[in-house]
């Protein structure tokens, strides 16, 4: 009887250990989707680099990427000739899908940004 009780306890502990290990593994292996669109006016904008996700938008301006549950980071869209609104989205320990993470692309005017316009304003007057 003592042997049978020890064997049953050992089996129960083994099952419990497998269950706990499986629960932790599922939690670590779960994935989350981050997706959205980038539009310039009413049209999708292709080939925008989603810095922080290592993905480009497709020909319709759509992006989608899978990250592990608990992902934290700042996503910054970049493409030469454009600024974006919002300029970035921050994520902290996300545990559910993040869909409709959309950005508006606005053409940037290189001569009107602060760095270049300040360069022209402070140019010495020729003599």
Image (cartoon, grey):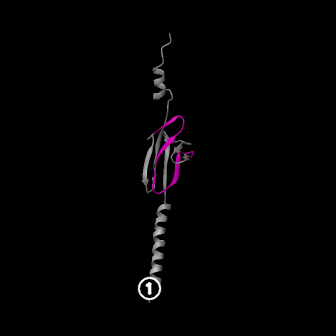
Residue furthest bottom in the image: 1
What residue is drawn where x is 48% and y is 16%? Answer: 124
Q: Where residue 55 appears, x then y in whole percent?
A: 55, 47
Magenta region, residue range: 58-84
What residue is drawn where x is 44% and y is 81%? Answer: 9
Q: Where residue 48 appears, x then y in whole percent?
A: 54, 42
Residue furthest top in the image: 127
Residue furthest front in the image: 2
Quarter of the figure with residue 121: top left
Q: Which residue is mark 1?
A: 5
Quarter of the figure with residue 13: bottom left
Q: Looking at the picture, tell me which residue is in the foreground, 5 or 19.
A: 5
Task: Check the picture and name the quadrant holding the N terminus.
Answer: bottom left
Numbered disc 1: secondary structure: helix
Q: Is residue 61 magenta?
A: yes
Q: Where residue 79 appears, x then y in whole percent?
A: 53, 38
Name the side, left or right, on which 56 lies relative to 19: right
Of helix, strand and loop, which mostly describes the magenta segment? strand
Could you tell me how many numbered marks the image carries? 1
**As drawn, 96 above or below 62:** below
Q: Where residue 85 appears, x then y in whole percent?
A: 44, 40
Report crowding for label 1: few under 14, some 14 to 19, many 20 or more residues within 10 A (C-alpha). Answer: few
What residue is drawn where x is 44% and y is 85%? Answer: 5
Q: Looking at the picture, tell me which residue is in the foreground, 46 or 9.
A: 9
**As drawn, 33 above or below 25:** above
Q: Is residue 48 magenta?
A: no
């Amino acid at each position: 009887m003592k042997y049978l009780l020890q064997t049953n306890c050992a089996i129960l502990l083994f099952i419990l250990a497998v269950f706990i290990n499986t629960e932790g593994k599922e939690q670590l292996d779960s994935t989350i989707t981050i997706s959205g669109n980038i539009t310039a006016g009413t049209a999708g904008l292709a080939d925008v680099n989603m810095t922080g996700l290592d993905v480009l938008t497709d020909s319709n301006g759509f992006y989608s990427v899978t990250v592990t549950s608990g992902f934290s980071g700042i996503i910054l869209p970049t493409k030469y000739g454009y600024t974006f609104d919002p300029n970035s989205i921050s994520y902290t320990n996300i545990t559910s899908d993040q869909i409709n993470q959309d950005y508006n692309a606005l053409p940037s005017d290189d001569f009107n940004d602060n760095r270049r316009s300040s360069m022209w304003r402070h140019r010495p007057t020729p003599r």
